[in-house]
Image (tube, rainbow, N blue to C red):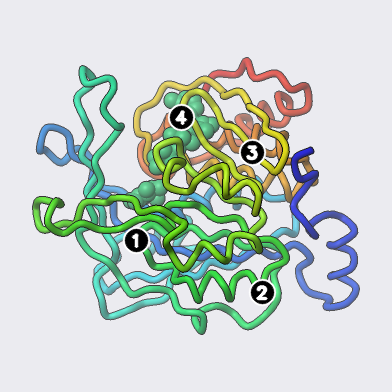
Amino acid sequence: MPPAAMPGVGEEAAEEQQTKQGGPALEGLVVGSYCHDVLLRGGRVVGETLGGAAAFVSTVLDAASPPGASFSVVSKVGPDFAYASAPAPARHPPLLCPAPTTSFHARFSDAAAHDAPDRQLSRVHACDPIYPDDLPDRRFAYGLAVGVAGEVLPETLDRMIRLCRAVLVDAQALIRVFDAAAGGGGGAAVRHTALEGTPYAPLLQRVAFLKASSEEAPYIGVETARRRCCVIVTEGKEGCRLYWDGGEARVAPFSAVQVDPTGAGDSYLAGFAAGLLWGLSATDAALIGNFFGAAAVSQIGVPTFHPEMLQVCAHDTYYSTHQYSI
Ligand SMILES: Nc1ncnc2c1ncn2[C@@H]1O[C@H](COP(=O)(O)OP(=O)(O)OP(=O)(O)O)[C@@H](O)[C@H]1O
Ligand SMILES: O[C@H]1[C@H](O)[C@@H](O)[C@H](O)[C@@H](O)[C@H]1O
């Protein structure tokens, strides 16, 4: 069986924590930096948006968490940060550093090139890493490690694991490397390295869920990783698969008209976490993840969610039908 729910995060755990500490029972900790995203097509800038997994994750958690499930965000930006008044950073302000805000250029391939990856990413600036001492010194029900530019250091992930009862990790926080020789335009091309050779690998057995896209999956070694934690592989418009020690499940997608793939994986992971917070099983929570992933690709930049969309999602999850188109 897949993990029934977020380990240690459920009604009993909530009651226990409420009684013992009197604080928010289901408080979460989101670690990863906001960034600037520049979208290019055919060498021309077609969009400039707030980015960073923390921005997408905060937006989804704000929309979908159960009442009383608050969260703190630890994110770093520079003096040039252009989106301080956007909803996610305004509600969850970043730490200010002297270094420039992390920024990415996303070059989109032409529609004709069907088998090409959605986009070529290059990192143009990298803000400071997030250090263990940057994290609040208190306990959390759950943590989300969602770096985009290598900012979640191994020692920071280790501290998250100590502070949080359950940690969910986006593989992109662990396996990205930056190739300055291949970036173009002063940036560094985003590449991947095998997780097994990194200092993050020994931490996996203390992680609850590891999420990777199908492009990242070969680098995390699904067969090895699933013996240490529950692995989720997102498959774009095909939905996702969960792998655990001894089994796997496929969870069907919602349909969407994709206008910008950016942040689909981030939104998926936050939707999945919100589902677990509501007490759903991992496979049902994955359906919520699919809903938010589909919602993300149907809007440019960080999406907005309308109450009626969420009502349809709740209805579809309850009846396990996914006929709704976004
Ligand atoms: N075109 C689509 N139609 C419907 N759902 C989609 C589509 N693309 C993505 N999704 C949903 O979003 C989830 C994550 O998408 P994907 O696997 O593309 O992540 P990703 O490559 O990490 O995205 P990104 O790096 O752009 O954040 C999928 O599992 C699916 O639920
Ligand atoms: O805003 C985006 C988003 O967070 C993506 O998930 C990440 O892959 C990119 O690096 C980032 O620029």
Q: Which residue is mark 1?
A: 149
Identify the residue at image location x=51%, y=65%. Answer: 31
What residue is rendered at 72% in x and 58% in y? 69
Coordinates of residue 195 in the picture (x, y in percent) = 45, 56
Q: Which residue is mark 2?
A: 163
Name the kind of residue labelled 2 in the image: Leu
Q: Which residue has dot 3 on it? A: 243
Q: Earlier in the sequence, mark 4 or mark 1?
A: 1
Contact between marks 3 and 2 (CB within 8 A): the answer is no
Residue at left offset 56%, top offset 65%? 202
- Name the N-terminal-most of marks 2 and 1: 1
| Secondary structure state at the residue bearing disc 1 | loop
Q: Is mark 1 within 8 Å of ligand 2?
A: yes
Q: Residue at x 74, y 50 (%)?
A: 277
In the rendered image, which quarter is residue 68 located in?
bottom right
Q: Is residue 239 left or right of residue 129?
A: right
- Asked if the residues shown at circle 1 and circle 3 are in contact, with their CB atoms under 8 angstroms apart, the answer is no
Residue 312 at x, y = what percent? 67, 26
Q: Tag 1: residue type?
A: Ala
Residue 273, position as x, y percentages in the image: 65, 49
At numbered mark 3, what does the secondary structure look like: helix, strand or loop?
Answer: strand
Q: Is residue 82 left or right of residue 185?
A: right
